[in-house]
Image (tube, grey):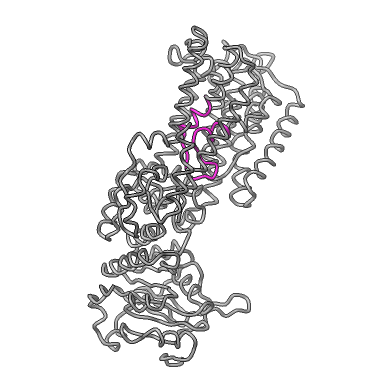
Amino acid sequence: MSDIKDEPAAALTHGQAEVAAIDSMAAGDAAPAAALEGAGIAVDTAAPPWRRLVTNPVFMTFFFLVVTMLIFSVAAPGKFGTRTNVEQLALNVAILTVVSVGTTFVIASAGIDLSIPSGIVLGEVFAVKALSFIHVGSGTAVDVAANKTTAWYVLVALAASLTAGLILGMVNGFTVGYMRIPPMLATLGSLGGGLGIALLLQNGVNTATYALNPVATSHLIPGVPNLILIGLLAVAVGYVLMHKSVFGRHTLAIGSSEEAARRVGLNVERHLLKVYTLGGLASGLGGFLSVAYFSTTSVAGHSTDNLQAITAVALGGTSLFGGAASIIGTLIGVWIPAVLQNGFIIVGVQSYWQLVAVGAVLIIAIYSDQLRRRSQNRR
Amino acid sequence: MMASNDTSASGGSTAARRERVPALAALSVEKQFGQVRALRGVSFEAMAGEVTALIGDNGAGKSTLVKCLAGVYRPDAGTIEVDGKTVHMSSPTDAESFGIETVYQDLALAPDLDAASNVFLGREIRKFRFLHDQAAMRRQTAKSFAELGVGMVQDLRVPVASFSGGQKQSVAIARAAMWAKHVILLDEPTAALGVIQTAKVLDLIRRVRDRGLAVIFISHNMPQVIEVSDRIEVMRLGARVARFERGEADVDRLIQAISGAYTNEVAA
């Protein structure tokens, strides 16, 4: 962490001078070469690879995660580092991973999505409602046992969950993109509204079902529970979409400068609609997976999922000001709170310390992002 | 700083020039905002291979005219011609389709994206329809930058936020030059720049002109206008009041024209 601490000094001394160190995080090394400042002159040599690595927020978070896991492995030999424990951790974070990948796009567009809990809960509720419309024998598909379920039931529930996410996401996208309501308030509204509708549909009571269990717990690939596979798949899809696709590029451009994006002819409103819809779909899918894994809806059980997802995204080096994002970072960011909680319990530390630790790590991560930006955005 | 002497286009006489078809022209354009008549029948011409400066005091209507030429505003009356043909533009995208690109003073680039991504923003080279081909875009950007003498191709992976103001403006102009087929509109491109950066940007403007594009250039800096322009058109109160060929005007004369003390425009 000491490398992050070094940054303010470097940024201030050289940032003030009329220099143009190209890699801002390398400002300390690059300043002398920048004497050639001008409109069209190559300004300095690239930063040495190690320096880039150390100043890369994603790498730093990854480094922190690895060190934490090593410490717990050493502190609790035969308990933390076991295959069972790591697999359990992966299962625990899988749903949050799916949701966080979606919200990474929203944050990359310089937005925020607080309505994640209502997306998840609506996804759950729509799934069980859809199952309850399928009549099986004397009951409905909600009541079938896990080993009696069919692909048809699963697909119907999935479609219903995605529909819930789609509707919520489109509402968010419309209010943010077209009505120009600040994202925090627009999604705060749909958070309350969505939860209210879910509670109305359920009369405030949860529904249990085993019909979707195989989605989470079966093994399509031997040794890897499906839920983990789905989480990894979401990361892979998110990675391509964010970093390799035109969609991701436009998302980052809008997050970086909406005005610049508008001037090159991007339809900013429509793109934001798509981005929030993607976020809503991810939440809806999260709800589907949640029913599948926990065998019940959980209308009151997701109220901090939005904050968890935002924490993960921010830890992963995605800038809350938009424009810079990392899907791999989000994957790492999802793991850090989970590892801390699990590790503290295993080594016998009060698990409440996890909250303190995550809070501290989050603030440090955001602070280093701020410093990076401050030293970069010189004129 | 006298590198602009090499322009062959400025050799012809005024009479010969008038017979050429302007790359972009405004004819008696009117534009009104509520009670304010921003443009009162202004005409304007820009020739291919020339830098045409558009000057005038604040409120003379320069920016309104440029926005009409860039497709941002639709004129209330009058016509816009591209290569002598009347065109109707209702958006900047329309203007782009006529080969007209605009460089704004600020907010032109997405600071978190690298130079190549900015250059191709909205016009990405694609593969499989939905993916972008970053390597190809980077190659093409490096090639164009080299041709235009924008020399900072050493690292096209770095966000433009870390560039100096002059470099950012160079990227913006180079981007416009890459895409413009006819005309580049520059709205005060050097307003925020230091001396050396300004010189670099002016060099770039000349190189863009030498590629045969019509460059339209708004500036408040009279010595700079005289240095870089092949022609100067002066606006006052929503209409053109004077036109100068290279060498015809000095700073005093320009200021007289701007303030209304001099005109060489025959009243319409």
Residue A76 image point, x, y percent: 52, 10
Is residue A323 covered in magenta?
A: yes
Total labels drawn: 0
- Indicate whether residue A295 is drawn in magenta: no
Quarter of the image where one finds residue B216? bottom left
- The vertical placement of A336 against B135, above or below, is above
Vertical comparison of B144 with B75: above or below? above
* Left/right of residue B180 with respect to residue A126 in the rendered view: left
- Residue for point 48% across, 10% down: A82
Q: Is residue B82 left or right of residue A371?
A: left
**Is A255 in front, or is B89?**
A255
Is residue A238 visible from the viewing direction of this image?
A: no
User: In front: B151, or A217?
Assistant: B151
> Which x, y percent locates residue B144?
28, 56
Q: Where residue A172 sits: x, y (%)?
A: 62, 43
Locate the C terminus of chain A and report the quarter of the image it occupies: bottom left
Q: Which residues are magenta?
A: A311-335
Residue occupying image coordinates x 49% and y 37%: A5
Q: Residue at image x 46%, y 72%?
A: B66
Q: Nearer the viewer, residue A294 or A37?
A: A37
Residue B206 appears in which quarter of the rendering? bottom left
Please tell me which residue lies in front, A191 or A57: A57
Q: Position of residue B77 (x, y in %)?
A: 51, 79
Q: Residue furthest top?
A: A78
Judge whether residue A13 can be spotted in this image: yes
* In the image, farthest residue toward the right: A203
